[in-house]
Amino acid sequence: MPTLDRGNAQIHWEEVGSGTAVLTTHGLTENATYWSLTGITAALAAHHRVISMDMRGHGRTRVDGAPHGFDVETLGDDLEALADHLGLGRFHLLTHATGGMVGVRYAMRPRARLASLILTDTGSATAITPGDPETRRRAMSQFAASFEGRGWDEILQRTRKHPGPFLFRLDQHPERERLWGIVERIFRLGDPDTIARFIRSFYADPDPQVEGLRRIRCPTLVLLGEHDVLFVEPSRLMAREIPRARWALLGGVGHMTAIEDPERTTHAILEFLADVEAGRA
C-alpha cells in the first residue's frame, strides 16, 4: 500500500492508468473509493493516469498525534507534496465536497500547477453551517459527537433513519439498497473518532474568498447535483466568480453525484477533460 510520509502523517494514495495525471480528492467520511467503487476511476484510467489519495483524517491515511493538520492549508500542502513525490509537473484535480474546498483554495495559490480543476458538490468557504462563530462551533461539535466513541454499525443505522441533506436523495433512489451498500463500504475504511476530530477542526472559515476565486486561471468545471441543497449557492458563486468556469447541473440527483449517477458524472468529467486537452475549455 503506497504512502507518502509527511512528518507524523502517512498519506495513502493509489494509482492506475497512464497519460496526463488526474489527482483526486473526496468528501467527509469518504476516501479514494468514492471514485473507484462507482467505476469513475476505471473510466478515467482508460485515458489518464489517475492518482487517488485519502486525505488526512480519512480512509487509510494515518496521522500519529498532534499536530493533526486538519485544516484547508495543510491539506492543500499534502496535494502539492504528493505531486512533488510523483514528479508531476501539471495535473488535473478532481474533487468532491470537502476535498473540493481544499482543491479550490489550492487553486487560488499563485503557483498552483493545475491543468484543470473539477469541483463537484462543494464550495469555497469551509464553514457549512450559517450563523455567528459560536453557533457554528456548537453545530460542528454536535455533528462531531455523532461519530465520537461510536461504531460504524450504529452510525450507519442512524444515518439510514435520518439521511440528512447529503444522503436524502440517495435514499430515494430506485436502487437505494445497492447504493447504501457502496456508502457503507466507503465509510467503513475510516475511523469515527478521527473523523470527529477532523470535523471540529476543519469547518471553520465562512469566507468564500471571492477575490481568490477571481484569481484562478486554470480551466474549471463546477458540477452540482440538482438536489444538493447546501451547495447550490456556493457552487453558483464559484461558477460566477472563477473566470470562464463551466457550469454543469445534474438533474434528479443530490450530493453524492458519483454514487447516485456515475454515468452522467463520468460523462461530464471526461467531456471537460477532453475539451481542456484539446484547448476548447
Image: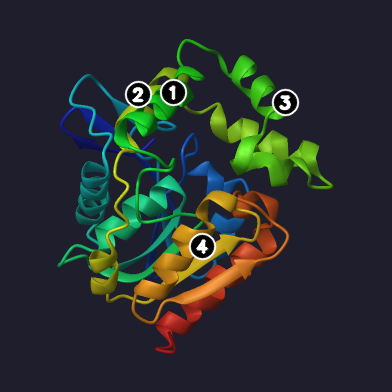
Give yes or no for contact between labels 2 and 3 (Cβ–Cβ under 8 Å). no
> x, y (%) of residue 112?
21, 65
Residue placed furthest toward the front: 132
Residue occupied by mark 4: 45
Of labels 2 and 4, earlier in sequence is 4
Q: Which marked residue is nearer to the observer: mark 1 or mark 2?
A: 1
Residue placed furthest toward the right: 174
Give yes or no for contact between labels 4 and 1 (Cβ–Cβ under 8 Å). no
Residue at x-position 32% and y-position 57%: 208
Q: Image height check: is 28 above or below 268?
A: above
> Which mark, by number, is residue 161?
3
> x, y (%) of residue 129?
44, 40
Query: Which kind of residue does numbered mark 3 sit on?
Result: Lys
> x, y (%) of residue 13?
37, 43
> Which mark, by number, is residue 197?
2
> Which mark, by number, is residue 250?
none
Nearer the observer, 231 or 151: 231
Query: Which kind of residue does numbered mark 4 sit on?
Result: Ala
Residue placed furthest toward the top: 149
Q: Is residue 249 left or right of residue 87?
A: right
Give yes or no for contact between labels 1 and 2 (Cβ–Cβ under 8 Å). yes
Q: Is residue 8 left or right of residue 138?
A: left
Q: Quadrant of the C terminus?
A: bottom left
